[in-house]
Amino acid sequence: MKKSSWIVILGILAVLVIWGISAYNGLVSKDEAVTTAWSNVENNYQRRADLIPNLVATVKGYAEHESSTLEAVVNARAAATSVNGGNLSTEEIAAYQKAQSELSSSLGRLLMVVENYPDLKANENFLDLQAQLEGTENRIAEARRVFNETAKDYNTSIRRFPNNLLAGFFGFEKKGYFEAEEAARTAPKVEF
């Protein structure tokens, strides 16, 4: 072979190596962005879990005979904090979301119980905790939205050609999404 042929071949190889390194590093960056977004979701759920003992203690002082509701909240909190997202597969995120949903449901029942106690509804500590909980729920919704957008960007990137070749070779796997719960898919029935 001529010297010019070798130069062309080496040039093509150099371009391919540079592309491979750049594409791999891009996939790693997107994978880390998904992991960071997931950490933000978990941090917000942990903030909610940390508020719950204070909320339960405040309500307990006013509503001693509502022990089954209080116990349900405590048990749901324990279950929710024991589940994690693992490698962020669709199934693992669904399990995490289910545990958090059960906690949200028990918190809803607790807040309904509060309606029976006017003194509690006026209690400054309770009002502050309720406001913090509401703010935390908003943070959770925002963190989930950001996670879904980041996961979408990552998933799109690993599926596009030629990145899909590198992603398959290096084991980059698709990440799951937070999805609407079954109950949220149907409009509530309003009757007067």
Image (tube, rainbow, N blue to C red):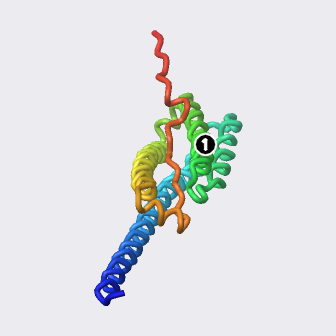
- Closer-to-camera residue (150/64): 150
Residue at horizontal 57 percent and vertical 53 percent from the top: 89
Is residue 161 in sight in this rendering? yes
User: In front here: 115 or 177?
Assistant: 177
Position above or below: 56 against 7: above
- Residue 99 placement (x, y as % from top left): 62, 45
Instruction: Inspect this view and state whether residue 135 appears.
Output: no
Residue at point 43%, 45% (across, down)? 141
The C terminus is located in which quarter? top left
Residue 82 rendering spot, x and y as whole percentages: 66, 55
Q: Describe the element under mark 1 as helix, strand or loop.
A: helix
Left or right: residue 78 compared with residue 89: right
Q: Position of residue 98 (x, y in %)?
A: 61, 42
| Total marks placed | 1
Q: Which residue is mark 1?
A: 98
Q: Residue furthest top?
A: 192
Horizontal and vertical percent position of residue 29: 41, 68
**Within the image, what quadrant is residue 14 found in?**
bottom left
Badge 1 density bin: few <14, some 14–19, many ≥20, Cα 10 Å: some
List the single residue furthest toward the bottom: 3
Which amino acid, by three-letter code, is at mark 1? Lys
